[in-house]
Image: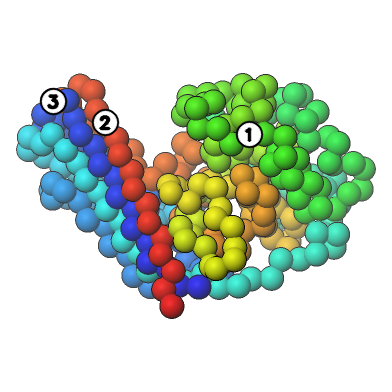
Amino acid sequence: MRYSLTHTTRYKYEGAVTVSHHLARLAPRFLPGQRCPWHILEIKPEPVGRSVHNDAYGNVTTYFECEGSHTELEVTARSLVQVLPTATPDPASTPAWETIREDTSGDRLNLSTEAGAFRFASPIVPVGQEFAEYARPDFTPGRPILQATVALMNRIFTEFEFNPAATDVATPVIEVLQKKAGVCQDFAHLMLACLRSLSLPARYVSGYLETKPPAGQARLVGADASHAWVSVYCGENAGWIDADPTNNILPSERHITVAWGRDFSDVSPLRGVTLGAGGQTLAVEVDVEPID
């Protein structure tokens, strides 16, 4: 599938901003199953300087700075993305989850121990007994890692309510577990906490969903904004496998990957600091259109 992707972010400031510095992670990644032949970042007011680099996780990151009095900032990312069908291994054929836990905690550098960097708590995602206990019914002794991950994903989808009013960006993950409600970011953070509390490597993935589904297919939850899901390491042969607990699916051609990291704090689409302003309002528009 090919998609035309537009992501517009608008800030309106209560007072004039004289200087602002920003980081944007809005360019889709190049992956074995994904191509981004064209991407442009339009910024108003025109920045006095910008530079592009890859961060520690390989995400394309644009730094820009604006000078001169302004009361609004508008950033529009336009991309052409091609998502290719990729084969997902039979969940029952993946290694036992205990094997993954042991392989990724070794002291010799290889693909598994490199993935092990995602086994630990991060700024937003804690590890703890409560999360391990929630995951334990799905991670029975000897169960294949992907099979157990799919079961955990299904249980979060079944037992938790998608409710934007239940949480905000500062809601702790333990509160999400207690309320059993939240949005895609909450469900991704919760699933990460569960997996990492069992010492399993898992990372946060940000991206988009197809806005208008093919005829006869259901519209996915979260298609009007940036979406979030998780990726779990399933061994050197299977590699990283994505899982979307908000929609209870293993992502394929309808998911577009932009960035990944330990949690949302590593991959926020746009962040920055301003001199002046006071308060501000934020509006975000996302449109993902399939191209015949």
**Does residue 146 sit above or below 3 in this rendering?**
above
Image point 70% across, 52% down: which residue? 233
* C-beta proximity under 8 Å, tags 2 and 1: no
Q: Secondary structure at mark 2?
A: strand
**Viewed as shown, does residue 119 lie left or right of 269?**
right
Q: Position of residue 53 (x, y in %)?
A: 35, 55
Image point 30% across, 56% down: which residue? 77
Q: Which residue is mark 3?
A: 15
Task: Identify which amino acid the numbered label 3 is placed on.
Answer: Gly
Q: Which residue is mark 2?
A: 281
Marked residue nearer the N-terminal end (2 or 1): 1
Distance, label 3 to label 2, CA atoms, is 11 Å
Q: Which residue is mark 1?
A: 161
Q: Secondary structure at mark 3?
A: strand
Asked where in the image residue 198 lies, by quadrant, the reply is top right
Asked where in the image residue 105 lies, by quadrant, the reply is top right
Seen from the viewer's position, the closer of residues 259 and 2 is 2
Q: Secondary structure at mark 1?
A: strand
**Viewed as shown, does residue 158 lie left or right of 209?**
right
